[in-house]
Each structure stands twice: as C-alpha cells, then as structure tokens.
Amino acid sequence: MPDRVTEPSDPRPLAAGVSAGASAGASAAPAVEFNDVQIAYGKFIAVHNFSLSIEKGSFVTLLGPSGCGKTTLLRAVAGLVGISSGQIAIGGRRIDDVPIYKRNIGLVFQNYALFPHKTVFDNVAFGLKYHNVPKADIAPRVARALEMVRLAGSERKLPSQLSGGQQQRIALARAIVFEPEVLLLDEPLSALDANMREEMRVEIKKIQKQTGITAIFVTHDQEEALSMSDRIVVMSAGKAEQIGSPTDVYDRPATTFVADFLGKANLLAATVKDRDAGGVSVTLSTGQTVRVATDRQVAAGDKVSVVVRPQKLAVGSELPNRLSGRVLSTSYLGSRIIYEIDLGQGSIIRANVAVVTEPVREGETIEVGFDPADCVLL
Ligand SMILES: Nc1ncnc2c1ncn2[C@@H]1O[C@H](COP(=O)(O)OP(=O)(O)O)[C@@H](O)[C@H]1O
Ligand SMILES: [Mg+2]
C-alpha cells in the first residue's frame, strides 16, 4: 500500500488516513501526546525535549518565528520525519506502531497543492477513492465537505477558476473529507491577502468546532494564534517556551521571549528595591521607581525586567506608576495614538493610548502611567 501522507512539495494531494486502525486507543486518551520528543536532522537538533498533551476536540497552535521547529513537529505527527527520542501517541496509540497510511490525519499546507487539471470534485474525492470508500458514498461525502467550506456547487470548476481563499478552502475540504482524527494545518493562511486571512481564520475555527476535530495549527502570526486557539505553544529555537491559553501567554508571559514575541511588549530593565505583601517596588535603569503586583519571590538587589504592554499605558493618568519622557514619534490612528517615548538612559517605550486629548507632539514631554496589576515581573 502506498504512503498516503506525502511531502508538501509532492504534487499528489496531502490528505491522508483511513478510518480503521489508528483510532483504536482508549477514548479518554489525549488526541495527541508528545512525550520528551527530540527530532534531529543529522547532527542538528531541530526540536528539544518537547512534551505536550492535546485534548480531543481542541485547537492547539504552535506559534514561533521561522525556523523554530513548528513544521518539523507537524511532520513528525504525520510520520514524514522520524523522531530521535521520546514518543508521540495519537489517540493513546504510539505512532511508531501505526503505519503512515493508517494514521488518520488530515493535512493542509500553505501552498494548496491542488491538482490544477482536476475539477474541484476530483481534487476532494481523490484520496477517498484510494481509501476503499464505497463508490456510492464518494459523491455525498464530497458534497458534505464542500458544503462545510461553503463551496457547494463548485464541483465542476477547476482550481484556476477559484480565488486563493477558495482554493485553500478546497484544500481544507480535501483534508476533512476523511473525517480524520487530527487535522494538521501548517501556515495555511500565510499565502492569502490580509482580508481573506481574517475571513479564513473565522471559517477554519467554525469548521473545527462543527466537526469537533482536534486541530494542530502552525503559524508565526501572533494574532492568528491568539484569535483561534484554545491553547498556544510559544516556541523558540526548537523548544516550547510557554504553553497556555491565549490570555496566559499574552497577559502572563513566562519569559522575555514570549513577552516580546506576543505583541511587542515594553521590557524595562530594573533592580528590586523592596517587597511587601502586595508586590515589589523596583528601580528602573532611568532612576524612576515603579510598583509591580506579583507574588514572585525576589530579593532586594535582584536584576529583573518589568514587562508592560503598550496598550496598558495611559497618558497623564492618575495611575500610581508614572513614567515621563520625550516623545520621539506620534502616530495618530483615529481612535488610538501610538507614541514612542524616550525615558532616557537608552530606554525607549511604546504607548498605545486612547485619544482623549490633542496628540502630544514629537519633542514634547509626556507622562504615561500604568497600574501595578497591568505589568509582569520577569
Ligand atoms: N530536511 C531538513 N534538513 C536539515 N535541516 C532542516 C530540515 N528541515 C528543517 N531543518 C531545520 O530545522 C529547523 C526547524 O525547521 P522547521 O521545522 O521547518 O521550522 P519552522 O516550521 O518553525 O519554520 C530549522 O533550523 C531548519 O533549517
Ligand atoms: Mg514551517
């Protein structure tokens, strides 16, 4: 039996799987489980000590910059790349025990990889024919998948007669027509223009909810990750930096990498002054003192970073933590203004504030404040 899962560069469609075999695990088992997985290409280790448990029916995103190992992890789940140590289980079954053609996995990649000379129907039905689906079931299943991606009636069209977004929806239909246990999506939106991307985010999320399919989504786009995911794995250099809900990773970043990668946080170098029940006071490198609400155990003299999101800063406010500096640039956006502010000592911050007064002009002095609860100590 030929492999059903193929390389992205392969002209054959990428959807894979049959309904038998791979779904034999206990129903309480996680949909996908990585246990201390390491993946190497020759001597280069692309993924280190990666552990993650994915609940059935959930939408999990691997988020990180190019080269951090996202695609490698998806390829490992699909069986396109071997792991050098650790285990991966799908539905409680170790994948080493399941031949690739029996893994019940749907795949969607950035480049749609549709057959250009086949109709939409044949593109979606292609894999079904190879998966011993009774002939009489093929047309209804294709119709259902096309309905799901809102392209019912396009059966006779060629991919070239469809927009980029529509082609990607056909690729999605082709991946879900199998009713796979797990759907792997590798940057499926990055080839689309901005408007189409936002529309497809909503679309993919809807289909995932409707079908109850477990999805592993890969992206380098933080907005995509925040808006679509139940859980996000923020990755850097082959490692998981933090695993949590969108609000966990955004509001409570565990590392400066996560703070910076998600939404360009302001990182202020500081030294701990003292602590009390509610938090700590720190002295910034500019000499200003601010308070941070935290239960982190730190001692006077410790070097720390205070992380504040640009949207958490307000102008001329009565908030307890105030920073003053010189405006380097003012970007008026209608309802918001983004200021770049020089606090001195090489410390530059961004503030994204609501428009309440006339914009402060470049070169002028500005005072911004933030709440001790609206920042994180790292
Ligand atoms: N076939 C390969 N041979 C050697 N190195 C590879 C191969 N594929 C990927 N890599 C390297 O592994 C790392 C992770 O790659 P990849 O998983 O594609 O990252 P991402 O999808 O996050 O951009 C990168 O440094 C990349 O250069
Ligand atoms: Mg990739």
Image (cartoon, rainbow, N blue to C red):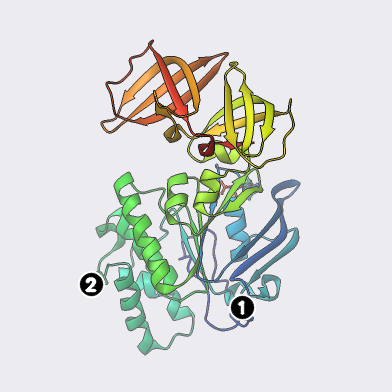
**Between 103 and 233, the one nearer to me in the picture:** 233
The circle on residue 126 is none
Crowding near the residue tagged with mark 1, few <14, some 14–19, many ≥20 C-alpha atoms within 10 Å = few
From the viewer's perspective, is 302 left or right of 209? right
The amino acid pointed to by label 1 is Ala
Looking at the rendered image, the quarter that the N terminus falls into is bottom right
At horizontal 48% and vertical 38% (from top left) the residue drawn is 263
Where on the picture, by quarter, is residue 254? Answer: top right
**Between 87 and 128, the one nearer to me in the picture:** 87
Q: Is residue 316 above or below residue 254?
A: above
Circle 2 — which element? loop
Q: Is residue 376 visible?
A: yes
From the viewer's perspective, is 377 left or right of 107? right
- Label 2 belongs to which residue? 153
Q: Is residue 58 above or below residue 188?
A: below
Q: Is residue 281 above or below residue 39?
A: above
Residue 67, position as x, y percentages in the image = 59, 43
The amino acid pointed to by label 2 is Gly
At horizontal 43% and vertical 56% (from top left) the residue drawn is 228
From the viewer's perspective, is 210 left or right of 43? left
The circle on residue 28 is 1
